[in-house]
Image (cartoon, rainbow, N blue to C red):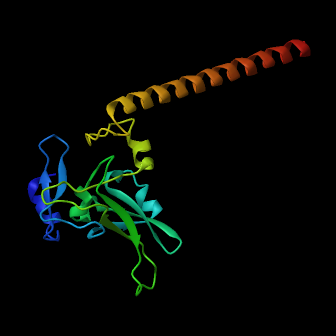
Amino acid sequence: MNENAVVELCKEAPDAVQVFRTCDGRGWAVRALRNIRKGAFIGEYTGELLSDAETARPERTDTYFFETRVGERLFTVDARLYGNFTRFINHSCRPNATVGMVVWEAQLEQLNHICIFATENIPKGKEITISYGQSWWDAKLPHFSCRCGQPNCQYSEDRRKTELQRLAAEMAADLQARSASAVSISSSDESDEKRSV
């Protein structure tokens, strides 16, 4: 994404934050431009509201997906084209912000707004981070690892390698079980043929 597109997406960024390009190759990020108090509202994750059918379309990419509810129905917010600065908040295994679902009282349909709040005092200049969650990493870890740099990183390159080894062993065991099942079926078919002769 070019810088002009990022500037357009971030026009609504409050005065308290700034989108910037990291120098360590992680891409875009968001930092505090002033001290942000613990519990303070940072922003709402916005984008295009998609149904399950729209989410499943092949041209959709899940990089900027976030699930929410309208009443009892599950929807996905896709910030890829229509999001704001919050789509650039990176993951950390030790985040300083969290995601909370908020419902405005006056709404007819109870849409859960995806809001981001500080979980600690965030000093001016510090990057704002959230946890993307276990299910996000379950889907992404086979493809890339976390680069948050925290000593307690849960999704590091070592963990990624371990996960890939686990998946490979699982696939090998499944393949072996299928092969054994096919041999067993083939053997029983041969026995049936011998009995009928």
- On the question of residue 59 being in view, the answer is no
183 relative position to 142: left or right: right
Instruction: Determine the residue positioned at 33% across, 35% down.
Output: 156
Query: Is 75 placed above or below 174 here?
Result: below
| Residue at 75 percent of width and 22 percent of height | 185
Quadrant of the rendered structure where residue 68 is? bottom left
Say if 116 sits above or below 29 in the image.
Answer: below
Residue 141 image point, x, y percent? 38, 38
- Marks counted in the figure total 0
- Residue 32 on image: x %, y %: 16, 61
Residue 50 in the image, given as x and y percentages of width and height: 40, 65
Is residue 174 in view?
A: yes
Corner quadrant of residue 3:
bottom left
Q: Residue 164: x percent and y percent?
A: 43, 29
Q: In the image as oriented, which residue stretches furthest toward the left?
A: 4
Say whether residue 23 is left or right of residue 85: left
Relative to residue 36, is residue 184 depicted above or below? above
Front residue of 192 and 86 = 86
In this rendered view, identify the residue nearer to me: 119 or 110: 119
For the C terminus, the image quarter is top right
- Viewer-nearest residue: 94 or 167: 94
Specify whether 52 is left or right of 61.
right
Horizontal arrangement in the rendering, residue 14 relative to residue 93 (left or right) = left
Q: Residue at x 46, y 81 (%)?
A: 109
The image quarter containing residue 140 is top left
